[in-house]
Image (tube, rainbow, N blue to C red):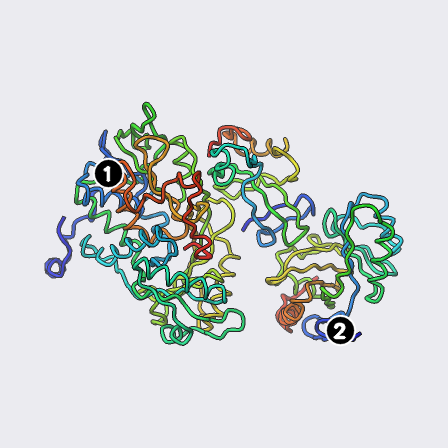
């Protein structure tokens, strides 16, 4: 099998903030009844974590679980473990309604680092990017420029953004452009 | 009415322009008229004009809640074309276009009709096929259009970028006899000619109720008192649903906002009208030099006549890929108008469930180009009491009969 | 620009993240219904200049359909609520009444 590479193959850009193609990342879309105990047990068995509250992303040693909608989670694991994690979930939930799909290769992930990460995203997403509008640990599904994206902050200087791989290079270019040195409002306080 | 002419200009110049009269009277409403038209926009005034001119019916009033031509007539992008796919549409829009050609002479008022030609860009393979089909349909309908290739587009519009990466220009449907006219002048010209025939135009007169007797209309109540009439015409784009409710029937119409903007004025850069339906943008240059740019319609009901920034952004973003030269221009102003949308994106002209009450509405995003044809047809329909040859297909009964005139599919977009 | 509160995500969402879905609380008429009802179902949408109930989809977010109570003449939003209901919840109706004392009530007097 050919070697899998991420959409921009690890490219990085250093401007007002750093933009980095975060490489291959295992992602599993899980749809089902989030109130169902068997489902949360299956997630726990596969990732070691319980379900996040609405809008939150929960991080653990083996990955992360993000709340995507009232009946959808996005599970982050190592790229190599995505298929086996799907198999685990499938076994655990056999016989009931659910949907678990390895979407790793349909996604691109970018990491932004610096004090201005909120300002960079604010240039193109219709979201209140203040710390009150998007607290640390909250994931927001929205659009960036003209394409769908989801992002969250793990602390005030680290933002991760996920989008469709098909628009990955556009998003990377967009982020680099938005992060051009000297284009962010001066940060005070 | 003293006619406008070169002699009149010379005469007035000699006496320091002191002798110009008012273009139209400002009468107080009479107690009663044969016919009352609600709405003094282009369509309403044209209806009144052709009632007087073609049918000898001059005991007519046009009532308007605001000022004449202050609705969509004053808010559109003034494009005139008739390259529609369906026979019924092509017939009435071509009638309108041909009336525009001689409208200045007819009204003795310069409406500045400029048959500069209209290009509808094909920017996808789908559009190429669609416009070739329209070209063939137009040929059978007697509407002069031609599908042209990108080189000819570039010759007609030197500022266009035909090989853009995202929206390349693959060809265009070219209607050389389409163009633009001065939108206010169309309303003013009709108003002046109506007033001259004795037709009363009553502005700032809002209709508050429609009176009926035995299932037929008997008059209206307005902020300037009651006016009785034998026949009533509703010609109020955007507010058709509100008037229909007063008259006691429903319309298959939703009112949505459509937006436009103009750039700062520049020297002549583009002397045709270019429409890009894939990206929802159309552009022409006014005589003042502003680029007049129109965008798409909102997808939700709205009566506020306001615009929204993201529509402008979308339209401009697409247009600067097609016309990179305009990327540094500043926007001068931006506005919204409320348009009537029907299910098949074609208008409604004809009778209503209320006897002697007629309606002309649903022109969607393309009413200006239709003004003379719409007025012509609505006047004939009201005078005879039944739809004329143009209106016959546009009755509102077509929705219950499933007999649509589907221009939403045909054009990909309604303009 | 409109901004609506997604009842599923609990965030205020801009119009550009949403897809409008037309009139809410439609009564469906399918095969077997008479022509007038079928026409009304397909084409006769309410078009009030005032209080209106609509379907919206948080298409760039959770993807769920929800309902909004809105004024078409001012763009004021009275509230949003779950789509799994046959009429607007009482608190939304009360908010409309507080802002629009002349509102006749849900499904009343709005012929168009």
Residue labelled with disc 2: A5
- Residue A21 occupies quadrant: bottom right
Q: Is residue B284 visible?
A: yes
Residue shown at the point (55%, 36%) measured from the top left:
C31
Residue shown at the point (58%, 54%) measured from the top left:
C16
Tell me, yes or no, whether the two marked residues, 1 and 2, touch with CB atoms within 8 Å.
no
Residue A29 lies left or right of residue B279; in this view the side is: right
Closer to the camera in the image, B347 or C72: B347
Closer to the camera in the image, B185 or B166: B166
- Marks 1 and 2 share the same chain: no
Crowding around mark 1 (Cα neighbors within 10 Å: few <14, some 14 to 19, many 20+) is: many
- Res. B383 mark: 1
Closer to the camera in the image, A2 or C9: A2
- Chain label for disc 1: B
- Residue C97 occupies quadrant: top right
Residue A69 lies left or right of residue A61; in this view the side is: left
Q: Secondary structure at mark 1?
A: helix
């Amino acid at each position: 099998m050919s070697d899998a590479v991420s959409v921009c193959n690890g490219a990085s850009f250093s401007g007002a903030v750093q933009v980095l193609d975060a490489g291959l990342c295992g992602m599993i879309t899980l749809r089902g009844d989030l109130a169902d105990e068997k489902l949360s047990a299956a997630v726990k068995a596969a990732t070691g974590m319980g379900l996040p509250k609405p809008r939150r992303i929960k991080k653990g040693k083996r990955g992360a679980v993000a709340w995507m909608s009232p009946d959808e989670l996005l599970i982050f694991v190592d790229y190599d473990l995505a298929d086996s994690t799907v198999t685990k979930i499938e076994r655990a939930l056999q016989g009931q309604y659910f949907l678990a799909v390895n979407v790793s290769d349909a996604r691109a992930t970018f990491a932004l680092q610096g004090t201005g990460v909120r300002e960079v995203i604010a240039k193109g997403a219709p979201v209140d990017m203040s710390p009150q509008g998007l607290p640390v640990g909250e994931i927001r599904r929205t659009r960036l420029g003209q394409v769908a994206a989801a992002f969250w902050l793990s602390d005030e200087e680290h933002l991760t953004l996920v989008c469709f791989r098909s628009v990955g290079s556009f998003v990377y270019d967009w982020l680099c452009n938005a992060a051009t040195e000297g284009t962010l409002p001066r940060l005070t306080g | 009415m003293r006619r406008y002419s070169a002699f009149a200009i010379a005469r007035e110049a000699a006496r320091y322009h002191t002798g110009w009269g008012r273009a139209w009277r400002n009468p107080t409403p009479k107690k009663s008229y044969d016919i009352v038209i609600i709405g003094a926009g282009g369509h309403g005034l044209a209806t009144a004009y052709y009632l007087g001119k073609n049918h000898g019916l001059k005991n007519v009033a046009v009532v308007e809640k605001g000022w004449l031509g202050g609705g969509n007539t004053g808010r559109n992008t003034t494009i005139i074309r008739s390259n529609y796919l369906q026979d019924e549409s092509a017939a009435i829009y071509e009638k309108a276009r041909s009336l525009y050609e001689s409208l200045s002479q007819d009204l003795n008022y310069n409406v500045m009709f400029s048959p500069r030609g209209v290009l509808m860009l094909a920017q996808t393979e789908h559009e190429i096929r669609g416009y070739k089909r329209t070209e063939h349909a137009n040929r059978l309908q007697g509407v002069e259009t031609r599908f042209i290739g990108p080189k000819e587009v570039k010759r007609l519009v030197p500022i266009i970028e035909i090989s853009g990466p995202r929206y390349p220009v693959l060809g265009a449907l070219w209607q050389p006899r389409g163009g633009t006219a001065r939108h206010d002048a169309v309303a003013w010209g009709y108003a002046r000619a109506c007033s001259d025939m004795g037709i009363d135009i009553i502005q700032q007169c809002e209709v508050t109720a429609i009176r009926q007797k035995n299932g037929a209309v008997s008059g209206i109540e307005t902020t300037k008192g009651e006016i009785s009439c034998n026949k009533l015409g509703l010609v109020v784009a955007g507010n058709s649903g509100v008037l229909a409710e007063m008259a006691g029937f429903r319309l298959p119409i939703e009112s949505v906002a459509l937006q436009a903007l103009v750039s700062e004025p520049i020297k002549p850069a583009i002397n045709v009208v270019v429409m890009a339906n894939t990206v929802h943008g159309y552009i022409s240059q006014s005589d003042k030099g502003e680029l007049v740019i129109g965008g798409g319609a909102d997808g939700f009901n709205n009566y506020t006549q306001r615009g929204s920034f993201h529509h402008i952004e979308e339209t401009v973003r697409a247009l600067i890929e097609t016309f990179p030269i305009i990327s540094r221009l500043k926007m001068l102003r931006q506005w919204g108008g409320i348009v009537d949308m029907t299910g098949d994106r074609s208008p409604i002209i004809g009778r209503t469930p209320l006897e002697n009450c007629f309606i002309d509405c649903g022109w969607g995003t393309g009413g200006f180009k239709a003004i003379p044809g719409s007025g012509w047809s609505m006047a004939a329909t009201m005078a005879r009491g039944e739809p004329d040859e143009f209106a016959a297909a546009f009755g509102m009964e077509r929705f219950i009969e499933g007999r649509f005139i589907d221009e939403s599919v045909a054009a990909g977009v309604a303009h | 620009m409109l901004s609506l509160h997604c009842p599923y995500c609990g965030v205020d969402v801009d119009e550009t993240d949403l897809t409008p879905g037309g009139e809410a609380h439609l009564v469906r008429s399918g095969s077997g219904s008479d022509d007038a009802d079928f026409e009304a179902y397909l084409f006769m949408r309410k078009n009030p200049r005032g209080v209106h109930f609509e379907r919206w989809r948080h298409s760039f977010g959770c993807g769920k359909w929800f309902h909004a109570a809105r004024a078409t003449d001012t763009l004021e939003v009275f509230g949003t609520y779950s789509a799994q209901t046959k009429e607007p919840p009482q608190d939304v109706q009360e908010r409309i009444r507080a802002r629009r004392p002349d509102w006749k009530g849900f499904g009343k007097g709005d012929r168009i």
